Image (cartoon, rainbow, N blue to C red):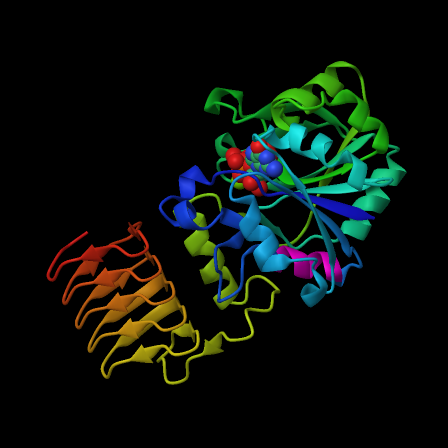
Amino acid sequence: MRAVILIGGMGTRLRPFTLATPKPLLPVLNRPFLEYQFQVLSRHGVREVVLCTSYRAETFRRVFGNGRRLGLRISYARERIPLGTGGAIKNAESLLRGTTLVLNGDVLNAFDPGAFLKFHRARRAEISIALTRVKDPTQYGLVLTDEKGMVRRFLEKPSWDEVVTNAINAGAYLFEPSVFAHIPPGKPYSVERGLFPERLAAGARIAGYVAPGYWIDIGSVEAYLQVHLDLLQGRAPFKPGPRARALKNADDARVTTGAGTKIAPFARFSGSVSLGASVRIGRGAQLSDCVVLDGAFIGDGARLERCVVGPGARVGTHTVLGPGTALAGGSSVGDYSQL
Ligand code: GDD
Ligand code: MG
């Protein structure tokens, strides 16, 4: 089975970090985020991958190439203008064969594609949608299924008064080849707002598969921080980057560092902390549940809690960065500031 991964979005909710790096390439424990989803695919024998690119398309090819390093065969379908989720899949049609696995590229989903395929075949579905349960379905695609697991309704970004279930689209689908005929070629089209509701209205068989296991969409700064905390705390079964090292003597905290990172005396860590490569942590700095990307500098006595510091950013002496702070790469915050 081939997989097609949608990675063309602009990642606007994850700015400033996505201004320089597209969302699927953002580092998570010293590894591009998408490589974690690749781990799931190769673990289950899916080795043929088509990447649908648009925003900063060339950077993906530079990082993943033909996929050999990752044990995959990667090819690329590039959009000249963003074609939306449906248009992107249609644009890749000539590279796909048979039943196709479609994945959103900003999701990490520890599901079993083989079990998903079995479910799909048993339901004789034209499309199957993997589902997960969340507290706030308004940020996602709401999926209402009947007692047999067939989808009755698909509603993208519902308002709270439309929320009738906590099951949402996990961003993984199985498509029979017949589906492609229902996607218009060469123009922007969405599977969530177009294809799924339209095929349901036409009476097509769409099945909803509740996928067990870890799931996260890293579309917001908070979620990008959360995936680090989850991996560090062992809540998700993934291998961090080869150069991510666990820091010893970190009290009870879980801390990883990249190559060349230097930590001055009396720095203190609590919770889970991810430090990139060549980071400097000043004397007596205190870091709790945060992410500091490559080359950043944290001044003496600075205090960071639940925040993300971009690559090469500089945090002044005794500065406090509170929960939710997202410091842009290369930016600088002066001494004694409070954010
Ligand atoms: N190639 C390409 N071209 N990819 C695109 C385009 C495009 O024009 N637009 C979006 N994508 C990719 C994004 O890069 C991302 O990986 C995926 O499609 C989904 O887009 P998001 O912008 O992240 O959508 P979302 O998170 O608001 O909602 C989607 O994901 C949820 C699960 O995380 C929807 O599919 C929801 O229904 C779903 O619940
Ligand atoms: Mg998303």
Residue 257 placed where, x, y %?
Answer: 42, 74
Ligand 1, by image quadrant, is top right
Foreground of the two, 273 or 9? 9
The stretch in magenta equals 35-42
Against 102, residue 240 (above or below) is: below
- 105 and 81: which is toward the camera: 81
Please indicate, yes or no, whether residue 271 appears anywhere in the rendered image. yes
Report the residue at 47% width, 24% height from top: 160
**Residue 67, horizontal then vertical, whole percent:** 69, 60
Q: Tell me if residue 156 is in the magenta stretch.
A: no
Residue for point 54% across, 56% down:
33
The residue sitting at 28% across, 60% down in the picture is 313
In the displayed structure image, the side of residue 136 where residue 208 appears, left or right = right
- Tell me what residue is drawn at x 77 percent, y 21 percent: 182
- Please name whichever residue, 46 or 186, is drawn nearer the observer in this view of the structure: 186
Task: Decide whether the magenta segment is chiefly helix, strand or loop.
Answer: helix
